[in-house]
Amino acid sequence: MTNCRTVGGCVSDYVAAGITFFVIFLVCIGICFVSIKRRQLELNAKKVSVLLVQAFASLIYLVSSLMSLNYLRLSRRHLWQNCDLMLWLKGPFGFGILLSCHIVQAYRLHYVFIARRLPPLKYYQLLPLLVSPWFAVAAVIQAVSDHDKRSPTCQFNIRWELAVGSLYALYPAILLLATWKVRHIRFEFDEFKELLKAASICALMLVVWAGMFVAAQLDSKVVVTTRFIVAVSVGVLFLFWIPIAKPVHDLFHGRRSNHRYSTMGQALGVPVSGAISQPLIAFNFNRPLELLLEHRRFRQSYLAFADSRMAGEVVHFYSEVRELNKLQQQHQVVQRIYMAEHIIDKYIKSGAPMEINISHQMRLDIINTTDLADPDLFKRAVGEVLKMMQMNLSNDYWQSEYFQELKDELDADVESQQTGDDLEQQLDVTATKRALRRLYDPTPDNPFDQGCPFSGELRKENQPEQHHTGESQSQRSEILLTSQDTTLPRS
Amino acid sequence: MGSLCSKGQPVAQEEDEERERELTRQLKQDDRIEKNVYKLLLLGSGESGKSTIFKQIKLLYNTGFDVEELKNYTPVIHANVYQAIKILYEGCLDLQKKDVSGEYMMRRENMEHGKRIAEIGDGVDYHPIGFLESDLIAQIWSDPAIQATYRKANELQLPDCTEYFLSGVDRLAKPDYIPTEEDILHARVRTTGIADVVFKHDGHTYRVFDVGGQRNERRKWLHLFDGVKAVIFCAALSEYDQNLFEDEGKNRMVETMELFESVLRHPSFEKTSFLVFLNKYDIFRKKVLSVPLNVCEVFRDYNEVQGDQERKISHALQYIKNKFDEIYKRNTPGLGTQRLCWLFETTALDPRIMKYTFELVDKNLVVSSISLL
């Protein structure tokens, strides 16, 4: 038995090694899968890099613990059975980075959802900061400690064991604290659950290690039990799979149910525009652009045109802010924050994938906001974007084939509606009346106005404006009429 | 580096990519159909005058603007006026806080008027300038504090058309106002996306593309880079003391030079000729006499010459031309190069200068196309 202890190769060792190999295998698959499909993880996109770092760290940790505990009966000494190497691999590169990644995520959640602002430190700034104490301790130990460098099991002086132990205890404690602080937030994507899982597993591992350590100090005869516990702790390591498990699960699940969200709005359950079944007869192109954009078919046509001019991001941005503004209720604050953060990442930050063309100051004002749930967060940017649409795109749109197509579609709709008119009138006179009223009298209960991002203000501004800017509107209708005749074929 | 495609797409979405591929394919197809079409690109950083040159091309070689198109510019011009007042007013308030001398203290009634006009400028809907507004605007514009702020325009993101429109604001407020061609050339619209115009001249067909110049717009340029006959690279001579609209920590001239370098280096342009339009020469002529060139970090080694104004101006211009020429030479292999580069100082607002420049360009292009083919 002593033999088995010193050189390895007990039954429990092989079981433990088997489990570890299995976990390594799983993590490897997970890493490959996530890195291949990283583009599909639209909603978790920002976490992918942290996730991969974390997965690699856990891989390093697993491999190094497998080697250092000398489970396998290896006849020859190998390079990796070097105590210093193990010290670095297990400590800073393995457990240190792994825990720090968890803390980075907790830090982000805390900032975004509790402080309601964007975290001042990026993850690639915070992560090195968090990992540095681990590297410092490892460096000091390597320089000062007089341990047996050739023993793979690495017995340190009790002082150093304590120093390392306190680090091992401190980080899970921070993680637990952070998890505790965000417990009230009703997250949409199970962030709290994941944090809690990570924190509790870390705590469990610590207890096991502490038990092992004490047992080994007390009596060398409990070695068999110790090694068994080690096997158990390797079993616990199985749960290192968790950082990578969730996205992989999401991907598989998403594929099977054929239900992938294409927008953040959908993922958060924002109802699609209320104007889908809007009778198209109610179309009036003299309305201000932001009211026209409320209509789904107009928006789609306009978006297609903007895309063809490579200016699609302004319309995409507008639609997403429109979705954000539908989340007005008190209990939807968390959803608003998700949406706001998503919009900032996608459209506002410099270098964002669909960055919009706004001024430096406006961008800074949004990024440095102190309340991500502020309903007016994007108000000025939306105004700017609308102006950009009006100045750059609208005039050309009215003369484009996209507008012509939409008009043809509408005409066809109107015709088909007229043929079925008699029947409809008999069936539901009130509905027709309502439709007529909608046409001629833009009352506040007009479905066009419902769900409009700035409906309150618009209503206020619009009514006097009808007299005020009557001239300019009739001007546009003139343009509209002429544009039909002079439609220029786009080359 | 704030240059072309320096920022990757961290979270590119598949659908977007699909869409972009489709667009690129379409553009390529267009090119194939029009094989004998000279494709010209207008490139350059923000506010370098690309769209003004684009408008000049429309005016000189295309159908120009009919009355409807002229009228369409009224809201744009009015928005320019509101925007200018808003920037001046807010800039003046900022300067008040920093400067205690009282130079930037507006008259009290102008404070209120300014606030009101700025609010209209913030609004989304088109608010035409009536007589009432035009009076207020004229009053604010004549306020000494606003004029003092205007002298510091390089620190604000103020469009170059400010003086042109504000000094004649009552003309814009008339109910029967129809913008003139000059007004349209002055009107400032931040281009987003891509616009093109096709025209025939001397038996050749040209297709000119206009693009947005801010950093976020530059990634869209890549779709146009295939089969370009010549790049018209615009740089505003007068921007050496201004900072970027999209990044106020960076000097515009520095950005332009970096951009020029990265465009020159792009593999698609190995055989593409470059026409560098050093634009806004009119503003430059005035500015260079009062603001020394070496305020800009890339012009640190500039030493002013003694002499009369003309001499100073031409010396400064030659210095900048040499800088651009240096960049061109540094990024073009000397031997066996298949491209050429011309530098022109231009004033995009002046139709006569532009007509002359285009004729020169045309001559050069024809000559080079014979020698290159």
Image: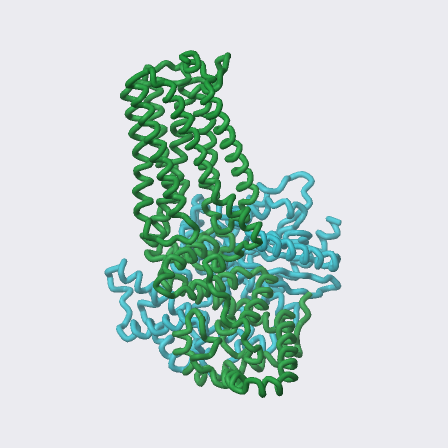
Chain colours: A green, B cyan
Residue B154 appearing in the image? no
Residue at point 33% right, 44% down?
Answer: A179
In the picture, measured across the screen, residue A197 lies left or right of residue B37, that is left
Q: Where is residue A95 in the image (x, y as percent from the top left)?
A: 39, 31
Q: Where is residue B205 in the image (x, y as percent from the top left)?
A: 72, 62
In the picture, measured across the screen, residue A257 lies left or right of residue A382, that is right
Measured along the vertical axis of the image, is residue A393 above or below residue B43? below
Q: Position of residue A490 (x, y in %)?
A: 67, 67
Near-viewer residue (B229 or A36) = A36
Residue A473 appearing in the image? yes
Near-viewer residue (B308 or B24) = B24
Q: Quadrant of residue A372?
A: bottom left
Q: Quadrant of residue A195?
A: top left
Q: In which quarter of the image is residue A93?
A: top left
Residue at point 40% right, 42% down?
Answer: A123
Residue at point 43% right, 69% down?
Answer: A453
Residue at point 65% right, 80% down?
Answer: A416
Q: Count the marks: how many?
A: 0
Near-viewer residue (A195 or A92) = A195
